[in-house]
Image (tube, rainbow, N blue to C red):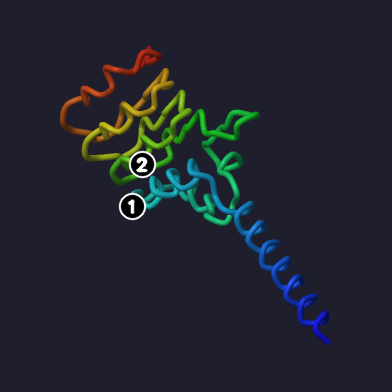
Amino acid sequence: MGICPVKWQVLWLYSVLLCITVIKSSAISADGEALLSFRTAIVSSDGVLLQWRPEDADPCHWKGVKCDSKTKRVIYLSLSGRKLSGFLSSDLGKLGQLKILSLHDNNFYGTIPSELGNCTLLQGIYLQGNYLSGLIPSELGRLQELTNL
């Protein structure tokens, strides 16, 4: 009689560990969380961001997003001319492997987030054709790869 409860405990523990593994593997990546935060700051758009879903494990198949094929990290965000309106989320600075940020010809307002200076691989930032104000953050001056602003 003592063996039966032990078997059930082991089976229960195995089931719990399996559930935790499945939940963890389907959780969105840190880059996905940063992009969802960016999406939250958008007041209106042409609907392009509706398919950006938190239940996706990674954002690599989202419209306007390209990822490195090996690391699955976001390297390219291009949502130009998509009628996006809102402010630029500082969480864009969490996209540590981002090389191109192309958000020109929209209706963004406010300032350019200084946190973009954390994206040390940025080669191009395209924000023309928006309603941004203020100075270009000095943190962008530290971006050694930046060739287009």
Secondary element at image label 1: strand
The answer to whether mark 2 and mark 1 are in CB contact below 8 A is no
Q: Residue at x 24, y 35 (%)?
A: 131
Q: Residues within 10 Å of mark 1 (few under 14, many from 20)?
A: few
Q: Secondary structure at mark 2?
A: helix
Q: Is residue 70 above or below residue 56?
A: above
- Reading the image, the residue beneath label 2 is 91
What x and y, as percent, mark residue 133?
18, 33
Vertical order, 1 against 103 (above or below): below
For the residue marked with disc 1, what is the amino acid?
A: Val
Which x, y percent locates residue 29? Answer: 53, 45
Quadrant hosting residue 70: top right
- Residue 43's mark? 1
Classify residue 14 as left or right of residue 65.
right
Identify the mark nearer the N-term, 2 or 1: 1
Closer mark to the observer between disc 2 and disc 1 = 2
Picture residue at 67% right of the left edge, 58% below the top: 22
- Report the quarter where the N terminus lies: bottom right
* Residue in the foreground of this view, choosing between 22 and 82: 22
Residue 26, which numbered label? none
Q: How dense is the environment of label 2, judged by Cα within 10 Å: few (below 14), some, or many (20 and up)?
A: some
Q: Residue furthest front?
A: 2
The amino acid type, in three-letter code, at marker 2 is: Asp
Residue 35 rendering spot, x and y as whole percentages: 44, 44
Which quadrant of the rendered structure holds the C terminus?
top left
